[in-house]
Structure formats: C-alpha cells, structure tokens
Amino acid sequence: MTSLEIFDRLESDVRGYIRSFPVELSSATGTTIVGADGTEYLDFFAGAGVLNYGHNNPVLKQALIDYISQDGITHGLDLATTAKREFMETFEKHILKPRGLEYKLQFTGPTGTNAIEASLKLARQVKGRAGVVAFTNAFHGVTVGSLASTGNKKFRDAAGFSLAHVDRMPYDGYLGDDVDTLDLFERMLNDPSSGLDTPAAVIVEAVQGEGGTNAASIPWLQRLRELTAQHDILLILDEIQAGIGRTGTFFAFEAAGIVPDIVALSKSISGYGLPMALVLLKPELDIWKPAAHSGTFRGNNLAFITGKTAIEHYWTDTRFEQQIAHKAGILQERLDKFVAEFPDYHLALRGRSMMRGILSTGDHSWATRVAQRAFEKHMVIETSGAHSEVLKFLTALTIEDSELERGLDILRDCIVETQPNGS
Ligand code: PLP
C-alpha cells in the first residue's frame, strides 16, 4: 500500500473524494482504475459523470495523440482555432440540427460552475430582474452565483455571507408522489400577494445528480416549460451531470420534448475528462457585449478535439442510444431484483436510465456503508443526497455488459453484508 502522507500533510483539508477512496490511483482504462500498488478497481462512478465514454477511451485518445503530435494549438483563449471550428461544425451537424435545436454556443471557463455562472448572469441581463428560482436538493456548483442556487447546506455554509436572489421551490416528488409541486409555483406566480417576484429564470436539473439522483417526471418538466413560457421566465437546464447520454439521449431534457432557453453543459462534453464547459443559448438571448464574460481558459482545444471525436464516434446514428438503453435495462432489472430480494431493507429506487440510485428508506447511513464495503471489494461507487443516503450508479455508458453484471454481483454481496440499522 502506497502512503497518502503528503496528501494528508500538504493538501488542504478541503479535499473530499480522497476520504471515501483513500488510495493513490495511477492509471485507468474503460471502467478499470489501477492503484499505485497495482490493485484494480471497478469504476461505478465515472469521475462524477465526466467519463461517460470510459477512462482513456482509445478512439478519443488516438485523436488527442494525433493532434498533440501535430503541434495543434493547445491554448487559444477565445480565438478562432481549427479545433474549435471543427468542434462547432460537428456539434451543429450531429447534435443541434438533428434535434431541430437552434442555439448559439458560449464557451465559458472550463468547469460546470462557470457555465452556470454565465447562464444566470445572462438570464438576469436579458430580463433585467435579479431573482432566480431553483429547486430543493439542486446542485449547480460552488462559486457564489451557482452556490446561491445550490440547495445543500454543507456547501452553502462555506459561502461566508448570505446567498441572495434565489427563491427555492420544491422539486418534483419533494412532497411525495401524490403532490404536483408545480401547483405551488404556479399559485405563487399568479398571486400578486405571494411575495414571489417574477424571476429572470428557473434553473433545473432533469435528473438531480448530487441531490439524490431524483428524476423529474416528463409531465412535470413539460409543465415547468409551459409555466415559465407563460410568465416570461427563462428556463435554464443544467445538463452538466444528466446530459451527454447519461439518461439515454444526448440531452436529458429531450425525453420531455421541451426546448430550454439556456442549457449548461460540462463534465462529459469533452468525453475524455478534459475540462470544458459550454452554454447553449437561444440566438435572441445573445445580448452579451464582446468580451463581457471573459476567461483565460475558455478554449481548451484538446477538449474540442476529444469532444468532436466523441460526437463523431457515438452520436451520428442511434446505435449508441440503443446500447445505453440495453445497459439501462440490465441495471433496472437487477435493481428491481434487489428491491424484491431484500424486503426488510425497504429499498427504493431513484433516477432513470444510466443515472440511478438506491436507498434504504429507513436508514440514512446505509448507502455510505454499502459504498465503503464495495470499496473494500475494489469497487468505486459514490453516494448522493442531502444525507448521502442514496447509493449512486454512474458507470461509463460504454461499460461492457459483463462488467456491469460483475459490479452488480459485488454490490449484491455488499447489500447482504450491510443490514440497514433498525431492520
Ligand atoms: N451542475 C451539476 C448538475 C453538477 O452535477 C455539477 C457538479 O457535480 C455542477 C453543476 C458543477 O460542476 P463543476 O464541479 O465542474 O463546477
């Protein structure tokens, strides 16, 4: 076992994931991560949704190696580069056009929270209103603008001052299956005495990643689109974790047949784990003044190369979507079996497609204990939710069926060995 001494001694206490997976990692391919001591780990976490095409995907890697060998531009600010032109052409041809979507592209600083900051800033400028509505359990990032729309207290408390200009509404399912939470929002929008000022925008995840793998229903998303349009409110879809195939289609909102005004993308958009973020905005919203939202690292040309190659390889026909649906079917079947096999555990499922969660409804600590047990068996899987109560399945979408089954076998053993408290 290699030592984590320098990480413990020199790196700030802010480090997080290393605490759940306290080993040094050296290399990775597909869904296998190799530790510095040679131990192999089966990855059911995919870099928090960054590695939808697996670690070091060979097709993307080759394109990257070729580009670097040819001394392609690496850093390009927001200059016109060949890599960026080709990415945009590919994105327009294979992603936007086939879906009938008309958006302009804004490349922001390379992390998800940068894309959210830009989306919120733009929406406020366009509407000339400060308010934004975000939902319970939302996670939109940790820089201050995004953080104001994030729900989780642990992150909010770190801000050090009050996070203003965001009103909170209950996400779909927050008040139980029988309540349509948009009734409240609609009522408040229509009532001049509700105390809710019409916001510039509503920001929402079609499936909440960090907040507990909660999937909004299709009718709920459709109603939210209608409601926002009726009230002249912009709809921002945060597709940072749920997008890029994770829920079975390129965009998670596609399933609802809605067209958001603004879409934030990051994580798997580069396909290779290279930092990149992108905001899609309806052309009429593009009121930015030149360089009004700048940033040194807006043009990660290496990410443009792998992002373009990923689209060309996986998204020019429907085969990849069919493969995702097939794997999602395996996952659904096995998760249903867990629920049926362990009735005393009171298991419940969350999410959709390849963004799934399972929790023991009576015991918040169960998922963390199962994840820890899984790690002892050399498997990397994370939890989500306000209390880390949901065990989150976030494998590469390219995972082999056999690896998916193997991971689910390991998890079944972990479930057998991890009784919920009080059951
Ligand atoms: N939005 C969503 C839905 C996310 O899941 C995340 C990160 O997990 C973010 C925004 C923030 O992205 P980043 O961590 O790259 O800033």
Image (cartoon, grey):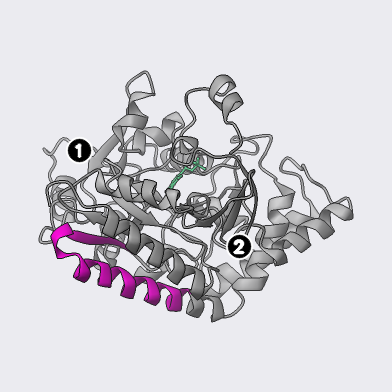
Tell me where residue 314 sits by quadrant.
bottom right
Secondary element at tag 1: loop
Q: Is residue 15 left or right of residue 313?
A: left
Q: Is residue 242 above or below residue 119?
A: below
Residue drawn at 41 percent across, 38 percent down: 124
- What's the residue type where badge 2 is placed? Gly
Question: Could you classify mark 2 by the number of other residues whose Cα lies within 10 Å: few (under 14), some (14-19), or many (20 or more)?
Answer: many
* Position of residue 372 measured from the top left corner of the image (x, y, whole percent): 38, 46
Question: What range of the chain is rendered magenta?
Answer: 324-351
Give the number of marks: 2
Mainly helix, strand or loop, the magenta region? Answer: helix
**Disc on res. 196:** 1
Pick the residue in front: 376 or 227. Answer: 376
Q: Is mark 1 within 8 Å of ligand 1?
A: no
Provide residue 285's location: percent of width, then percent of height: 49, 50
Percent position (x, y) of residue 64? 77, 57
Residue 264 in sight here: yes
The reply to whether the magenta stretch includes residue 401 is: no
Mark 1, other Cα within 10 Å: few <14 / some 14–19 / many ≥20: some
User: How far apart, in angstroms, are the residues tagged by discs 1 and 2?
Assistant: 48 Å
- Residue shown at 81% from the left, 57% from the top: 65
Residue identifier under label 2: 30
Q: Is residue 30 left or right of residue 171?
A: right
Would you place residue 177 above or below residue 211 in this image?
Answer: below
Q: Is residue 215 visible?
A: no
In the image, what residue occupies the spot 63% across and 67% down? 311
> Which three-letter amino acid code belongs to the residue tagged 1?
Leu
Q: Secondary structure at mark 2?
A: loop
